Image (cartoon, grey):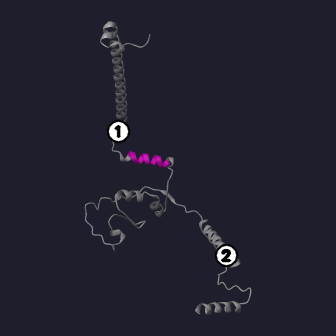
Amino acid sequence: MKFLISFESTAQEMANNPVGVDNTFRKKIDREEFLQRARERERQEQEEDERRRSKGKGPPVQRKPLKQRDYEIDLESRLGKTQVVTPIAPLSQQAGYYCSVCECVVKDSANYLDHINGKKHQRALGMSMRVERASLEQVQQRFELLKKRKPAGSFSEKDLDERIQKQQEEEEERKRLKRERKKEKKEKEKAALQDQEDVDPDIAAMMGFGGFGTSKK
């Protein structure tokens, strides 16, 4: 009885719906709307790319060439010392080597040297990784400075002549020893060939020395 009632109610609902009306509750996609959204999103992305490119087209940053440090690097003042480290301590008081320019902590001295000589640190100091080309005047001034630092009488032309003469004597001694070794080797080979010629071939063959001779016929 229940089955008949439900069937009749369903038939009555179908009869009430007009012919040609979609009553399947299926969601339809408006292609024109989604196409318009895609075009709008693509336009916004293109504008964003153009904005980024326009920002990157600014004048290049002129950096100074590398310069020699005018201070000594402290790597040994904290060796052998005990330090209490807390999570809330500032970077300058944490364990390791603190770089105030880049505001970072490096755990050991080797990595700290790599850091301060690296590209990132030098850029933070306003310098590039290129070395300035020295002029002739700068080289001459450098030589003059080194001459002033050297104590008087530490080196003379006489010392240079003595060094050159000593080096030549050592070279001649090496050549003489080499000739003597070569001559001694030839004499040994000649004596071995003479001994082989003095031995009777039959006796040498019986003793197993027949292979010592030359293979040339």
Would you call the spot at circle 1 few (<14 residues within 10 Å), some (14-19), or many (20 or more)? Answer: few
Q: In which quarter of the image is residue 87?
A: bottom left
Up the image or down, 171 lies above or below 95; here it is above
Cα distance in 3D space between marks 2 and 1:
82 Å
- On residue 155, the disc is 1
Which numbered disc, 2 or 1, marks the residue that appears first in the sequence?
2
Q: What residue type is labelled 2?
A: Glu
Residue 98 image offset from top left, x and y in percent: 36, 65
Up the image or down, 192 lies above or below 52; here it is above
Q: Give the range drawn in magenta.
A: 137-147
Residue 96 as seen in the image, left or right of residue 66? left
Quadrant showing the N terminus: bottom right
Q: Quadrant of residue 210?
A: top left
Up the image or down, 178 lies above or below 96; here it is above
Instruction: For residue 198, say whether it is visible.
Output: no
Residue drawn at (36%, 30%), measured in percent from left and top? Answer: 167
Residue 90 image offset from top left, x and y in percent: 35, 72
Residue 141: in magenta span: yes
Residue 157 image offset from top left, x and y in percent: 37, 35
* Residue that label 2 marks: 40
Residue drawn at (45%, 56%), measured in percent from left and top? Answer: 67
Residues 185 and 110: in front is 185
Total labels drawn: 2
Residue 2 as seen in the image, left or right of residue 141? right
